[in-house]
Structure formats: C-alpha cells, structure tokens
Image: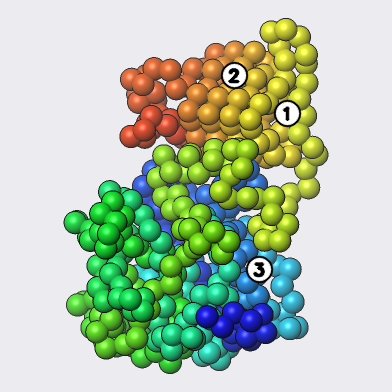
Amino acid sequence: MHTAKRFVSRLTRQTLALVLAGGRGSRLHDLTKWRAKPAVPFGGKFRIIDFPLSNCINSGIAQVGVITQYKSHSLIRHIQRGWGFMRGELDEFVELLPAQQRIETSWYEGTADAVLQNLDIIRSHEPEYVLILAGDHVYKMDYGTMLAAHVENEADITVGCIEVPIEDATAFGVMSVDDELRITEFEEKPAVPKAMPGQPDKALASMGIYVFSTRILFDELLRDHQLNNDSSHDFGKDIIPSVIRRLNVCAFPFRDPVNKKPAYWRDVGTIDSLWQANLELIDVSPELNLYDAHWPIWTYQEQLPPAKFIFDDEDRRGTAVDSMVAGGCIVSGARIRHSLLFSQVRVHSFTTVEDAVIFPDVDIGRHCHIRKAVIDRGCRIPDGTRIGFDKKADENRFHVSPKGVVLITPEMLGQDYPHGL
C-alpha cells in the first residue's frame, strides 16, 4: 500500500469529514436523558466526541462538520468552547451542522438523510473524498491510512471494520469479504451473525466509518432519497447493502500499525461497556493510552486547581490507589480505590469509593460506601449512603445494569439536573 507521508497528506487535504453526532444512545438509559451520546463524559476529562474529532486533526483532516440533532445543547457548547482553535483563514474548521430542514420540512430521518440534507455544504467545500464517522465510539485511528487504501483499491466506498465476538455482533453491521477485501455481503444488526471464515467465534463488524468518493456519495444519497418510505435512509441498513453488487465497496480492517492485531475500539453504548472502558484506563499499560504525546486527545480545558488529598489520621486518610483523579477534586479523609474521578468531585471523610466512575461536580458525603457505580454529573450523595452492596435496594432507587453496575443520576436522588450536562 502506498502510505508515503506526502501522498497521505494530499489525500487528507482533499477530504471533508462529517461526524454523525445526533444519536440518543438509548442503551445508556438516563445518562442520555438530557444529552446526546457523543456528549457523555469519558476518561476523566473528555467527552466521547473528542476521540473522532482528535483523530481527524491528528490525521491531518482540518475540515470537519459535526451533524447534531438530539438534545444537542451540551454537545454544541462543548464544541464551541473546545474546538474553536482551527484557523479559519486557512479554511480549517470544526463546524456545527444542526438539523435545519434544508430539504423539504423534515428533520434528519437517518444517518444517510442527515448527510443528504447537508449536500449543499459539502458541495461548497469541493472535497475529493468524504469521510463519514460515528461520533459515539472511543478509539485512536489514523484516517489517512484508510484514505490511502481507498485510493489504492480504486474503491467507490470503503468501510472501516473490526473483529468482534460473535455474541456481540447482533449490534453491528456484519460483512463478508473476498480475498481482496471487497465486501460481498453486508447485513445490519443480523439476528444470526455470519462468522468469519476459520474463526467461528468472531464476526467482521462495521465501525460506522465510511470513505466515499464524493461523486458516488452524491449519486447514492439522491438515489436513496427517491425511495421515500421504502428506505430508512441509513448507511448501514440501506446504502451499503444496496451498492455491494454494483460498486467497488471495500473493507478496511482496523489494525494496530505495530503488531497488526485488531486495534482498540470501543462502542461504549451501554452502562456496562462505558463503566468497563473507563476503568480499563487505570490499568498499568492500558490499550488506550491517553498519555501518548504523538496522538493527543484534544478537548475543552477548564481552568482548575490541582487535585487535593487531605487528612492523614488512621481512620481518616485522603488517599487514591489505582485510580485517576482529575483537576479540581478534593479527597478529604476518604479512600478511593480503582476508580476514575472527573473534575471537581468532592469526597468527604470516612467514605470509601471503589470500582466507580464519578462524573464532574459530584459531592459524596461522609460515611458513604460506593462500589461498582457510575454517578452522573452534579449528584449530591447524602451522608451514610451505601451503593453496590444490596442489589434489591439499589434497584428500588437507581438503575442496575445486567452486570451489576449501579447508575445514579440527580433525578433518581430527587435533585435537579445541573446546568452544563
């Protein structure tokens, strides 16, 4: 494959990226009651959408549109505050594209329709290629290598893919490929996923990442639009299955550039997967390295003081072990073990927090015991609260996931949601 830097750089300069960020993410339950899934906090200081946006910038793609719809206020505010550093005079931008009824009087009715309704904006930038991304996955990827593969294969469409356990494949688009990585079959969220040849426990799943040659994108979106009610106007359900027999549609396996094994990629679309992916970051050598200076994850940076740990009495010692603690936190005579604390969390004396993900601006009172939980932004946990020890009691007050993770939100506690979700 032709991956010379100059060749790849030329391709990224000719590319417009569109990040689909309008999804609700209903499997995250109350976490997405007042925010879109891409706006959900992740990793101690980021939001999920920061990962595909950072991938674009780090890949050299400097023209990015973010397509929003569902409860997008906090997402829009985050992008305005954190992604305004692009050089407009050099035609660089991260631009918000909310639903505006550009075509007829409908809002975005599917992923393909969301792009169709912005065709005039795409045309105005005259890209050679359009990179379509999901805004709700966590991973680090150089899109330049995918663009290079698209050109080398003379593909009309290239679909990013990754191996997933066969039992999880019902949540994805599943494909089959030939020896030259041309897609021969594609089914969105199949009831019985087709296994990979020689790997009965694996399926080849779409990452929701597509490279289109621009002319092909226009043709297929307009063709799909003419179907009206006969289409759900979705890339995975409609566009890709309809073109694999008549266009050159190729797969791009997402692999680690060093060891060539399947790379880190997480669909944090459930409470269990979100909790697990956050706590994986605490590992000594996590698969997702947030400390990689060569591939930084950009985000909005609040001006906060350092985290503080106070008191050193035998039964009242402020400590955190095997944990990540963001700026502005105060651990006052409490014990934190194997947990991730976002910014401005307060944990008061004689409290223990273990295996927990605590979103920003949470206040945990004295003599609390918190275990295996996700606590949403702005919660005020009363003194003496026990979470994660009595499943029935937790189910009566909160949401308990299939794997026993307890989700707590302000509303469940009878409190108001904070401004700035």
SS assignment at label 1? strand
| x and y percentages locating residue 177 in the rendered image | 30, 73
Which label is found at residue 352? Answer: 2
Which sits earlier in the primary sequence, circle 3 or circle 2?
Answer: 3
Which sits earlier in the primary sequence, circle 1 or circle 2?
Answer: 1
**Residue 186 visible:** yes
| Mark 2 surroundings: few (<14), some (14-19) or many (≥20) residues within 10 A | many
Residue highlighted by disc 1: 330
**Residue type of the residue flagged with mark 2:** Thr
In this view, the residue in front, 360 or 12, is 12
| x and y percentages locating residue 102 in the rendered image | 43, 81
**Residue type of the residue flagged with mark 3:** Asn
Residue at point 34%, 73% (across, down): 235
Look at discs 1 and 2 and give the one toward the viewer: 2
Q: CB atoms at circles 3 and 1 under 8 Å apart?
A: no
In this view, the residue in front, 108 or 315, is 315
SS assignment at label 3? helix
> For residue 220, which quarter of the picture?
bottom left
Which label is found at residue 58? Answer: 3
In this view, the residue in front, 182 or 215, is 182
- Looking at the image, is 42 positioned above or below residue 222? above
